[in-house]
């Protein structure tokens, strides 16, 4: 795969204005990109004029000093100097104000989609490959919320009474199944070469800005206002920022990290869609994979991380497909993304269970994560993906492993994690 555009610094933006403007359009972002370029041009002009005037001021200072040494009247030169100094002060204030405005707009400029990403909206997502065949059994498969309530392991009304919609209460075999999945996911990721972390579930503005959630998605986040800390929407935020403002040794790359965390999202999908059950939640658990990689190998590392997530689905024997997301469906920070979708016969639809994304140096530049070694230096590339999001995997198991007599069979790989139990009943 060809390399994508990586260097979204000011110089790159100036030299590739047409490309950047097109990227904003392809991603359907609302940033006023024309205002960014106009204000940046004005800021640079102010700085250039200030430098010119500062040079004049230096010459005037020298002339004043020479006149004083010669016993000559320097009042005219001093008056001129004061005028120049006043203009410099005004330009400095103007440049500072423009810098603030430019910075605010800069943080809203999205990463540039890779050329291999299909153009268009969600309807243009391309199926890259499939695994397994979706099967509709010869009996009526109940949606997960129905069989979950029948078995007494899913309690939506209790969750709603204490927290409102978008939250869940699982008990007994349901709670244990979720815990089994978490432990198995993490154990398999360790076998795949990842290092497990226990990370904070609250993050400051710098961390949230670094991974691209702020400023764009602030209204979708849960904020603890008194401390100005955000409940993380994904472990991606705090895993990635483990190396905030650090320089990594090139010889140590790739670094492969994993962690489980709760995820908190105020916006849980489109209004009116998937309001029942576990599909769209304000709070859910997820195991995350994050890589810090050499820019020269980052595209291969994306494929490798995606394969790691796929291995989980294959061992669970869940039919899935891999989609390459179209530009209008890419996240703000991603340059390319593969979505892994599992088929669930109860709700009769494909459910996204992992998004495997490459950000090139977009996040690293915002978080200050560099590398050096072998005569090279720069910003690392970051890659992440869910391995996996728990609620929808629970849905897929409850519906794909449902039996005609109203039980849920346990996937073989999870039986040891379930104390040897083969069914939830």
Image: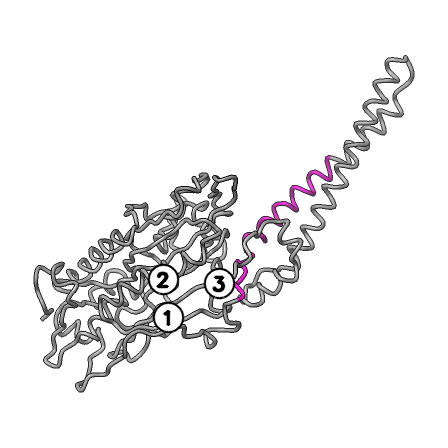
The tag earlier along the polypeptide, 1 or 2, is 2
Q: Marks 1 and 3: CB-CB under 8 Å?
A: no
To which residue does mark 3 refer?
1
Secondary structure at badge 1 equals strand
Coordinates of residue 252 in the picture (x, y in percent) = 39, 42
Q: Which mark is residue 322?
A: 1
Q: Classify 10 Å Cα crowding around label 1: few (below 14), some (14-19), many (20 and above).
A: many
- Residue drawn 41% across and 49% down? 292
Q: Quadrant of residue 61?
A: top right
Q: Marks 2 and 3: CB-CB under 8 Å?
A: no
Spatial CA span between label 2 and label 3: 15 Å
Which secondary structure dominates the residues rendered in magenta? helix
Coordinates of residue 109 in the picture (x, y in percent) = 56, 57
> In the image, is residue 422 above or below residue 260?
below
Residue situated in front as seen by the camera: 90 or 53: 53
| Residue stretch rendered in magenta on the structure | 89-115
Q: Quadrant of residue 213?
A: bottom left
- Residue drawn 41% across and 72% down? 128
> In the image, is residue 230 above or below residue 149?
above
> In the image, is residue 28 above or below residue 187?
below
The tag earlier along the polypeptide, 2 or 3, is 3
Magenta stretch encompasses residue 153: no
Residue situated in front as seen by the camera: 22 or 266: 22
Secondary structure at badge 2 equals helix
Given this view, does label 2 or label 3 mark the residue nearer the observer? Answer: 3
Q: Marks 1 and 2: CB-CB under 8 Å?
A: yes
Q: Which mark is residue 306?
A: 2
Spatial CA span between label 1 and label 2: 9 Å
Spatial CA span between label 1 and label 3: 17 Å
Magenta stretch encompasses residue 92: yes
Q: Tell me if residue 392 can be seen.
A: yes
């Amino acid at each position: 795969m060809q390399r994508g555009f990586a260097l979204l610094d000011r110089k790159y933006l100036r030299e590739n204005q047409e490309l950047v403007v097109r990227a904003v359009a392809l991603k359907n972002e609302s940033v006023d990109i024309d205002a960014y370029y106009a204000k940046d041009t004005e800021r640079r002009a102010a700085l250039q004029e200030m430098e010119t005037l500062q040079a004049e001021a230096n010459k005037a200072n020298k002339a004043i000093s020479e006149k004083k040494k010669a016993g000559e009247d320097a009042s005219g030169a001093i008056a001129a100097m004061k005028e120049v100094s006043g203009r410099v002060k005004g330009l400095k204030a103007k440049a500072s104000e423009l810098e603030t405005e430019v910075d605010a707009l800069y943080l809203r400029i999205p990463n540039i989609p890779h050329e291999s990403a299909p153009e268009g909206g969600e309807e243009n997502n391309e199926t890259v490959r499939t695994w397994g065949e979706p099967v509709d059994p010869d009996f009526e498969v109940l949606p997960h919320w129905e069989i979950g309530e029948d078995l007494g392991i899913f309690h939506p009304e209790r969750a709603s009474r204490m927290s409102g919609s978008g939250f869940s209460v699982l008990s007994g075999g349901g709670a244990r199944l979720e815990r089994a999945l978490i432990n198995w996911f993490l154990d398999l990721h360790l076998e795949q070469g990842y290092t497990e972390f226990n990370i904070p579930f609250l993050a400051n503005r710098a961390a949230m800005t670094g991974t691209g959630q702020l400023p764009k998605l602030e209204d979708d986040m849960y904020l603890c206002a008194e401390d100005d800390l955000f409940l993380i929407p994904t472990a991606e935020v705090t895993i990635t920022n483990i190396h905030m403002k650090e320089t990594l040794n090139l010889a140590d790359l790739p670094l492969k990290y994993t962690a489980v965390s709760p995820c908190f999202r105020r916006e849980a999908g489109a209004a009116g869609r998937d309001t029942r059950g576990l599909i769209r939640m304000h709070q859910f658990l997820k195991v995350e994979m994050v890589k810090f990689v050499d820019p020269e190998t980052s595209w291969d590392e994306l494929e490798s991380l995606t394969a790691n997530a796929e291995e989980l689905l294959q061992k669970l024997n869940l039919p899935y497909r891999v989609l390459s997301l179209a530009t209008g469906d890419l996240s703000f920070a991603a340059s390319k993304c593969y979505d892994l979708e599992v088929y669930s016969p109860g709700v009769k639809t494909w459910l996204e269970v992992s998004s495997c994304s490459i950000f090139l140096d977009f996040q690293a530049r915002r978080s200050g994560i560099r590398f050096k070694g072998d005569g090279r230096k720069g910003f690392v590339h970051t890659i992440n993906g869910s391995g996996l999001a728990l609620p929808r995997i629970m849905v897929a198991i409850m519906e794909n492993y449902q039996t005609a007599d109203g039980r849920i069979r346990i996937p073989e790989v999870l039986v040891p994690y379930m104390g040897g139990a083969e069914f939830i009943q």
